[in-house]
Amino acid sequence: MNITFPLRKAFAVLLAASLIALFPPATLSASAADPVPSMVADINTSGDSDVYESTVFEGQLYFRAKDGSNGSELWVYDGTNAPSMVADIRPGASPSLPSYFAVFSGKLYFQANDGTHGSELWVYDGTDAPSMVADIRSGSNGSGAAYFTEFNGKLYFRAYESATKGTELWVYDGTNEPTLAADIRPGTGNGLPSELTVFNNKLYFTADDGTNGFELWVYDGTNAASMVQDINTSSSGYPFGLTVFSNKLYFEANGGTNGFELWVYDGTNNPSIVQDINPGSSGSRPRDFQEFDGKLYFQADDGTNGAELWVYDGTNTAAMVQDIYPGSRLENNGFEEETVINGGRPDYLTVFDGKLYFTGTDGVHGKELWSLAAPTAPVPAFAATTRTSTGFTVQVTNYDVTYTWAVTTTVGTASISATGLVTVAGVPANTSVIATITSSKAGVTSKSATSTATSLKTAVFTPTVGLPTSTAAGFTVQVTNYDASYNWSGTANFGNVTVSSTGLVTVAGVAASTASVATISASKTGFTPSAVSATAVALSVEAVAAAAAEAEAEAAEAAEAAEAAEAAAAQTDDKKLNAGSFKGYVALYAKGYQGQKFSAKVAGKWLTVDVLPSNFERIVRFTGAGYDIKLHMFIDGVLLKQMDVLTK
């Protein structure tokens, strides 16, 4: 059942001439992306449209407005198309002033004045023209039927029948004529019940019994109505704007000390003040309460920003949503100019189509119709997925630690890290999986998005390597089953790795005598990567030096061999050098070199005959049997023979 706001809100409002966005909220905004109020439409292009009250009926927003041709009549807005008039209840420029909208038994009830019967109870079924339900007070003055509220399957309201009863609580069952339900102030006085609200299966309202002033009352539908508490014992508490939120009854009241502030009643304990928004006796005058997106929104004046839009979550301190009309202005009070604090004065708060609608002014466009969208969590956005053999990983690119994040998956398990990395695991090879990631925060609409990937196929190729060869800067190793159709790469705990086009792996940049482990990987699109490891120790400084010396010696021997070969090619049968072995001796023979110097390097030691005495000479040296002896024989310092002799 939808209840609108009391007729005591006596000033009219306009619809906007165009869509307008305000500056971001200054108080409760969580980020620059939070929604802000905006204007809806211009009904009266030549002046004020006097938008007044609103309620939702059959998925559309109904309210009172005037278009410049007709008086204030019943209008409707579907959330998309331009608002339109439902019916001209009082034809001509005079207004029917429909108000106190309430939905009961599938119909829209409201107060209206057709110019003949005064303000009475009317009904609209969404199709046929609106019609009067009953002429409770005969004549043109009307009963002033108002504050329509459904309770226990009936429509309760206040009305004035005659001077003998005054304005009291009435009831209508949808079929029979309305009747008096409770005479709060018996006799000719007026109980003036208002703010009718159902809470804990009882009907609560504000009324005056003639003794305690206007206080909070309750009616169970059977027993006599009774006062809940005398909130202000020295005067009236004036509990107005009764609204149920979070299983409690909230309202504006004046306890006699703090002025009009936000109060609460839990149905058991005495009503109490929630917060002194404007400290002191002036009060903040909170009003137009409306639950929206799990919070209580209302108008309040903190004494600094004027009457603006406020919000209360039921736990934390109430706070201003936005300073719609900031600053102050000078006004003439009839005697002098005085400074007046501006205020957006948001009135008639109503939820429709997922938004909070209200009237307000920014100081530029006058009193207009505004809307506030519910704050929402960020819709998860993702980078590219990385497939794995057991699922996939994906980064949430708009991850925000101020939100709570959760992830579910169609296959396997899923988790999300403190940095927004989503990991899906436990998925069979080559299986499609969908992960749903959700962001949420208390008081904010959660949002979800999905990321889909297919786990990799099982690897069908495993690389193998040969024996590594240590080098001065690392080592090399050959991939023995290298396949160029795969992508090859390598990493090492020390040094860097390259893989050649023939599969030769080179590890470089490793310190001397340091062991390095290289991992060589082979990958192909759609398959699980496979890898093999190879380990070797880089050569020591001494080994590197020895290898260099050996290489130098080998180079020298090679040069000598070349000289010997050249000399051997020049020998004839008359001139020969040769060698052999017997009983552990090495025997060197020189033929045809009489008178020349003979020298030989035998097992690294020199053997010299300065002048060969004859054309055939044998020179021997004992070395022991079983050795492979390298021989270098020179004539006059020229290497002519180089050979190996196995000693016997």
Image (cartoon, rainbow, N blue to C red):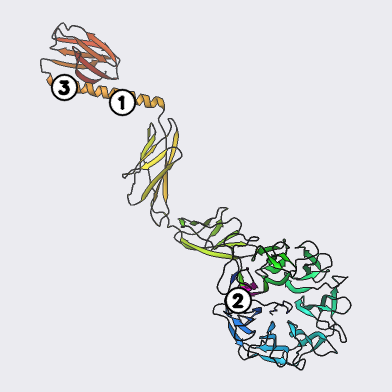
Q: Earlier in the sequence, mark 3 or mark 2?
A: 2
| C-alpha distance separating marks 3 and 2 | 113 Å
- The local crowd at label 2, few if under 14, some if 14 to 19, many if 20 or more residues have their Cα within 10 Å, is many
**Relative to 71, does residue 496 appear above or below in the rendering?**
above
- Contact between marks 2 and 1 (CB within 8 A): the answer is no
Q: Nearer the viewer, residue 245 or 12?
A: 12
Classify 589 as above or below 298: above
**Residue type at mark 3?**
Glu
- Residue 589 screen position, x and y as percent: 18, 13
- Which of disc 1 and disc 2 is earlier in sequence? 2
Residue density around tag 3, few if under 14, some if 14–19, many if 20 or more, within 10 Å:
some
Q: Label 2 belongs to which residue?
A: 15
Q: Residue 28 in the image: x percent, y percent? A: 65, 61
The question of residue 453 being in magenta is answered with no
Which of labels 3 and 2 is toward the front? 2
Which residue is labeled 3 in the image?
566
Q: Residue at x 73, y 73 (%)?
A: 243
Q: In 3D space, how far apart are the residues under numbered discs 2 and 1 (Cα atoms)?
A: 97 Å
Q: Is residue 183 shown left or right of residue 508?
A: right
Residue 285: x %, y % from top left: 75, 68
| Residue span colored magenta | 350-369
* Residue at the image point whose x is 64% and y is 85% from the top: 71
Residue occupied by mark 1: 551
Residue 355 visible (yes or no): no
Q: Is residue 541 left or right of residue 299?
A: left
Quick one: SS at disc 3? helix
Image quadrant where residue 229 sits: bottom right
Q: Residue type at mark 1: give it.
A: Ala
Q: Quadrant of residue 121?
A: bottom right
